[in-house]
Amino acid sequence: MPDLYKKYKEEVVPALTKQRDYKNIMEVPKLKKIVLSSGIGYDAERDAFQEAKKQLGSITGQMPVITKAKKNVANFKLRTGMLNGVMVTLRGNRMYEFLDRYVHVALPRVRDFRGIPKKGFDGAGNYNVGCPDITIFTEVDPDALKYPLGFNITMVTSARTDAEARDLLKLMDLPFAE
């Protein structure tokens, strides 16, 4: 059982129940899934997708999938079925282990880090944050990277409002900027 999951069960649930005055334990918001996605681009070489897949797989412990365009977009010279990115969805223990490494190992390695932005909430209790460089993770060897790679992290919660989600993520040690 991951440490962050233990913390959620033992500290976060009682704190949120007291803070928000929930009557039932099932009302307490929880983290449903974390989605990591990276847009590679339509003109990238085939091995850029394989490298991105390998790097995201190494930091998550789960094999990502290569995504394809769902419709034509003339401005981006994109056709239906063209490769355009890589994504992986984490749930359960892997989700909590990734979040723990992201918060306690990767973010402290960012130079001049002042916290993650508060404006990444979508109005439905989900949070998005971008990571411009994958080398903040210790699993990635910066010398072996041929292509620069950034990605987006989406944290999907069961919270009904952004305020509930913010309280949940703050109690789970996410360092929001002041």
Image (cartoon, grey):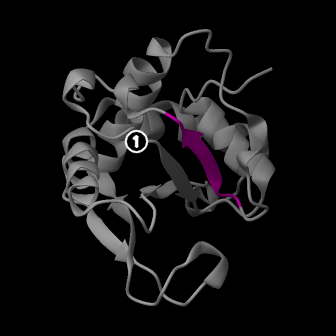
The residue located at (49%, 21%) in the rendering is: 107
The residue located at (79%, 62%) in the rendering is: 123
In this orientation, which residue lies closer to the viewer: 77 or 156? 77
**Left or right: 112, with 96 as reference point:** right
The question of residue 174 being in magenta is answered with no
- Which residue in the structure is indicated by mark 1? 149
Magenta segment boundaries in residue numbering: 125-132
Query: Can see residue 21?
Result: no
The residue located at (61%, 39%) in the rendering is: 169
Characterize the local packing of mark 1: few (<14), some (14-19) or many (20 or more) Cα atoms within 10 angstroms: some
Instruction: Report the amino acid beneath label 1.
Output: Leu
Q: Position of residue 96 (x, y in %)?
A: 36, 42
Q: Position of residue 11 (x, y in %)?
A: 51, 30
Q: Position of residue 17 (x, y in %)?
A: 66, 44
- Quarter holding residue 117: top right
How many discs appear? 1
Q: Position of residue 74 (x, y in %)?
A: 63, 84
In this orientation, which residue lies closer to the viewer: 168 or 61? 61
